[in-house]
């Protein structure tokens, strides 16, 4: 990492009073969860239209549940990494902080982040296709076709599938935080899936400085004031520690 580039990022983050962060699968990659679009990504082994759409679930709920039960098992074995913990530390040091995540893995909360908006849902939650009841089912294995304990209808993962709307309430909070922040961080996302990715441009339009952390350039790089290329787990602890130190010093 070029030290002067890192210092630019520190200078951008340190004075911020209100920070919003958008994270994607890349921040959890080093916890051992595959991303979606990389060479070993989920979408190389599974076709989204077969396992992550309402139509796929209507056609073959068992196949869809196989995919989500596989991901739940995987998630049961992993822990947050230093990048998740660094964001929790940053939150504790700032007056206004909102963590908007596309990830459904719950690792940000596990690392201690509090103000977390999970715009694509959560893998540990299930929702009834009949009565709409939502249940928390963390770290337990579910049957192949789980049924609602209230009405007996089929449960589905409480995540957002392709072609579905995001929760209006969660999205409104994400937009408000993005519009109000003076620094917007975009971390470990290909910035390809909208509407979440569009938050980067919203932040920019509202005058926020944009700071990106990713292995490689993405569409967000075009509007970022500073892009740091490398692993989030290696960059964020140092960036956050130095920004907090500079803020107090
Ligand atoms: P992607 O798989 O599209 O992108 C992951 C990004 O993380 C890429 O830009 C990588 O370069 C970067 N990356 C990988 N490892 C990294 C590391 N160690 N440190 C920093 N960056 C790293 O995942 P998302 O952008 O999260 O949606 O995908 C967005 C949405 O598409 C997901 O929420 C999911 C998916 O289909 C739904 O399921 C609705």
Image (tube, grey):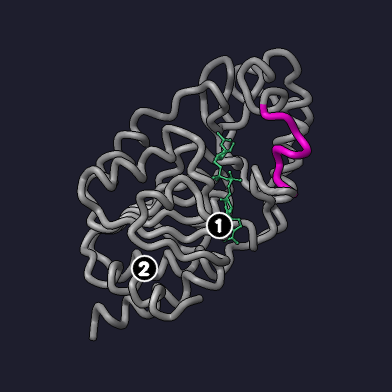
Residue 68 in magenta stretch: no
Instruction: Report which quarter residue 144 is drawn in.
Output: top right
Could you tell me which residue is drawn at 33 percent across and 68 percent down? 92
- The answer to whether residue 45 is magenta is yes
Q: Does the closest atom of ligand 1 sit within 8 Å of the Cβ of label 1?
A: yes
Above/below status of 65 relative to 117? above
Q: Distance between the Cα atoms at labels 1 and 2?
A: 23 Å
The span picked out in magenta is: 40-48
Residue that mark 2 sits on? 90
Give the quarter of the figure containing the C terminus.
Answer: bottom left
Query: Pointers 1 and 2 in contact (CB under 8 A)?
Result: no
Q: How many marks?
A: 2
- 46 vs 24, left or right, is right
**Lateral position of residue 31 relative to residue 83, left or right:** right
Against 213, is 3 above or below?
A: below
Give the mark, 1 or 2, whose residue is nearer the N terminus.
2
In the foreground, 128 or 206 = 206
Look at the numbered disc 2 and give the secondary structure of its residue: helix
Pick the residue in front: 189 or 80. Answer: 189
Task: Estimate how packed mark 1 is, as few (under 14), some (14 to 19) or many (20 or more) residues with alpha carbons within 10 Å.
Answer: some
Give the percent coordinates (x, y) of residue 133.
Answer: 51, 25
For disc 1, the marked residue is 216
Counting from the top left corner in percent of width and height, residue 166 is at: 44, 29
Residue farthest to the bottom?
249
Residue 108: which disc? none
Nearest to the observer: residue 130 or residue 12? 12
Q: Is residue 74 above or below residue 80?
A: above
Q: Locate residue 78, reporting x and y percent.
A: 68, 59
Q: Residue at x 33, y 32 (%)?
A: 169
Q: Say few, some or many: other residues with alpha carbon within 10 Å of mark 2 (under 14 / 14 to 19 / 20 or more).
A: many
On the image, the x and y values in percent for residue 11 come to 28, 73
Which residue is at 69% across, 51% downward?
34
């Amino acid at each position: 990492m070029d030290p002067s580039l890192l210092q630019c990022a520190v200078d951008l983050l340190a004075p911020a009073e209100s920070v919003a962060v958008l994270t994607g699968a890349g921040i959890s990659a080093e916890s051992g969860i595959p991303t979606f679009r990389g060479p070993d990504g989920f979408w190389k082994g599974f076709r989204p239209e077969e396992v992550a759409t309402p139509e796929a679930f209507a056609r073959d709920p068992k196949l869809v549940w196989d995919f989500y039960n596989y991901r739940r098992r995987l998630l049961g074995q992993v822990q947050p990494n230093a990048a998740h913990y660094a964001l929790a530390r940053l939150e504790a040091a700032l007056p206004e902080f909102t963590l908007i995540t596309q990830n459904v893995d719950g690792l940000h909360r596990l690392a201690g982040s509090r103000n977390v908006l999970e715009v694509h849902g959560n893998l540990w939650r299930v929702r009834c296709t009949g009565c709409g009841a939502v249940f928390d089912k963390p770290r337990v294995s579910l049957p192949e076709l789980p049924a609602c304990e209230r009405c007996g209808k089929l449960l589905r993962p409480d995540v957002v599938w392709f072609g579905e709307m995001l929760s209006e309430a969660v999205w409104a909070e994400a937009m408000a935080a993005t519009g109000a922040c003076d620094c917007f961080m975009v971390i470990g996302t290909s910035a390809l899936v909208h509407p979440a990715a569009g938050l980067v441009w919203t932040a920019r339009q509202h005058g926020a400085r944009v700071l990106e952390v990713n292995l490689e350039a993405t569409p967000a790089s075009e509007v970022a004031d500073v892009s740091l290329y490398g692993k989030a787990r290696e960059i964020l602890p140092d960036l956050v520690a130095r920004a907090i130190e500079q803020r107090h010093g």
